[in-house]
Image (tube, rainbow, N blue to C red):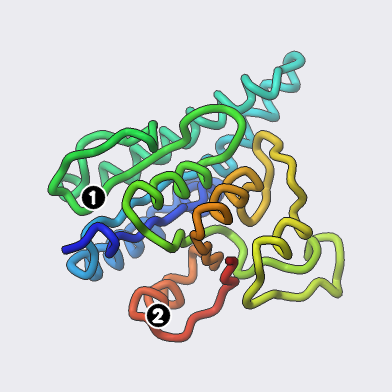
Amino acid sequence: MSQKNSIIISLGGSIIVPDEVNATFLKKFRELILQNLNKYSKIVIVAGGGKVCRKYNAAAEKVTKISPENLDWLGISATKLNAELIRVIFGTLAYEKVINNPHQKINTKKRIIIGSGYVPGSSSDLDAVILAEQYGAKTVINLSNISHVYNKDPRKYKDARQIGVMTWKEFKKVIGGKYVPGMNAPFDPVAAKRAEKAGIRVVVMKGTNLANFKRFLQKKPFSGTVIG
């Protein structure tokens, strides 16, 4: 089976641990991945830091002034903890180590590979894009706590509207080009720039709506935003 049949999933930390670890979601997510495992040569899941990252960053900043780089290192540690959780729930079906360097070549027959954050200056979204390049995947599925990209922040503007399909240029107008540690964006701007350059599309969808994600995996109509 060709490596080009691989899929890359950027799994938002805020749906892994909304407040407490979401074991109910993880159980259903695991079942869905295993149901579709034979369709793909590799399923690469990159865990984000989400609320765990933001809580630690906020606590550190209450104590003293923290550099953006050190805030990022805190966030990266949060992604590693979340990634280890994902790895262990797949047991022997997953590669035995969390990949924290997306440039690293992994020689394994295991179909499930789990990744985490890597270095400061971007979120785990960038690692997902780099892994897509590694495995020849043309799509990154971004499972987050939002269902779509909006034309403006729906938390601030009642007239914000969902977008079904957009170009990378349109996306950059919405989120801007600057990365901030712990930022809560549909997809990090550093990752967006690399995805655009590599010709990789990103599909943003509500991660907890697993019925919708299943439709995507079955190549059926789904709800979400396709970028690129």
Q: Is residue 76 above or below residue 139?
A: above
Query: Secondary structure beneath disc 2?
Result: helix
Horizontally, residue 11 falls left or right of residue 59, namely: left
Query: How packed is label 2: few (under 14 Cα within 10 Å), some, or many (20 or more)?
Result: few
Q: Quadrant of the N terminus?
A: bottom left
- Kindly identify the amino acid type of the residue bearing the numbered disc 2: Arg
Please provide percent x and percent y for residue 21. 45, 46
What residue would you read off at disc 2?
215
Horizontally, residue 130 falls left or right of residue 223, namely: left
First in residue order: circle 2 vs circle 1: 1
For this orientation, the residue located farthest to the top is 64
Please provide percent x and percent y for residue 175. 74, 54
Please provide percent x and percent y for residue 181. 66, 34
Q: Is residue 116 above or below residue 204?
A: above
Q: Nearer the viewer, residue 188 or 31?
A: 188
Please provide percent x and percent y for residue 48. 50, 44
Horizontally, residue 67 falls left or right of residue 21, namely: right
Q: Kindly identify which numbered label has been placed on residue 90.
A: 1
Q: Nearer the viewer, residue 202 or 33?
A: 202
Q: CA distance from mark 2 to mark 1?
A: 22 Å
What residue lies at 37% left-to-right and 81% top-to-bottom? 219
Horizontally, residue 178 falls left or right of residue 124, namely: right
Q: Kindly identify which numbered label has been placed on residue 100.
A: none
The image quarter containing residue 9 is bottom left
What residue lies at 86% left-to-right and 66% top-to-bottom? 157
